[in-house]
Image (spheres, rainbow, N blue to C red):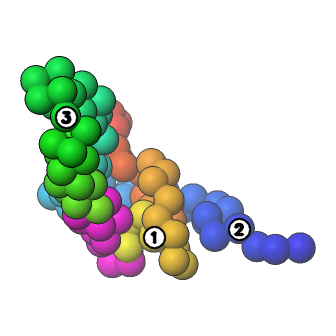
Amino acid sequence: MRESSFPQEVVLSENEDFSQYAEGLSKVRRRRWCLWGVILIYIPLIWTTLTITQSDRATAKVFAVWFIFACIASCISAFVKCPRCGNLFHVNGLIPMYFRRCLHCGLPLNADKKKE
């Protein structure tokens, strides 16, 4: 039987101060929002380009630029370190997996925002 790469038991101590991770978790969230922003702008961008230019060639150029930004945003968001364990937050192995917890220590993305 193959072991899962996600931690089986998430160890969140009740007396652990998650506010110390606020800056690092904020960085992870900002980078995720950057990726989502690039993804969400795709359809309006292509539609506007087609409407204004009526040219497949111009649309292909806009797509190429968007694709480069999407690759950059994907790398930036994937290769951010967990403030708790220091490993990559979204990468365990070769493929980034955008779960809402660190793939190594299980730190939730919004741990610093939870009310006591």
- Spot occupied by residue 20 in the image (x, y as percentages of width and height): 21, 60
Residue 72 in view, yes or no: yes
Q: Quadrant of residue 74?
A: bottom left
Amino acid carrying mark 3 in the image:
Ser
- Identity of the residue furthest to the top in this view: 51
Q: Select label 2 or label 3 by which is in front.
A: 3
Q: Looking at the figure, which quarter contains the N terminus?
A: bottom right
User: In percent of the image, x 46 and y 65: which residue is there?
Assistant: 96
Return the residue nearer the eye: 54 or 5: 54
In the picture, measured across the screen, residue 66 lies left or right of residue 43, that is left
Q: Which label sits on residue 4?
A: 2
Label whose residue precedes the other's in the sequence (1 or 2): 2
Mark 3 — residue? 55
User: In percent of the image, x 51 and y 69: which residue is there?
Assistant: 95
- First to last magenta residue range: 72-87
Residue 79 magenta:
yes
Q: Residues within 10 Å of mark 2 (few under 14, many from 20)?
A: few
| In the image, residue 71 above or below residue 53 | below
Return the residue nearer the eye: 46 or 88: 46
Residues at marks 1 and 3, CA–CA distance in whole angstroms: 39 Å
Amino acid carrying mark 1 in the image:
Val
Residues at marks 1 and 2, CA–CA distance in whole angstroms: 13 Å
User: In percent of the image, x 51 and y 77: which residue is there?
Assistant: 94
- Spot occupied by residue 75 in the image (x, y as percentages of width and height): 29, 67
Q: Quadrant of residue 114?
A: top left
Mark 1 — residue? 91
In the picture, measured across the screen, residue 21 lies left or right of residue 102, that is left
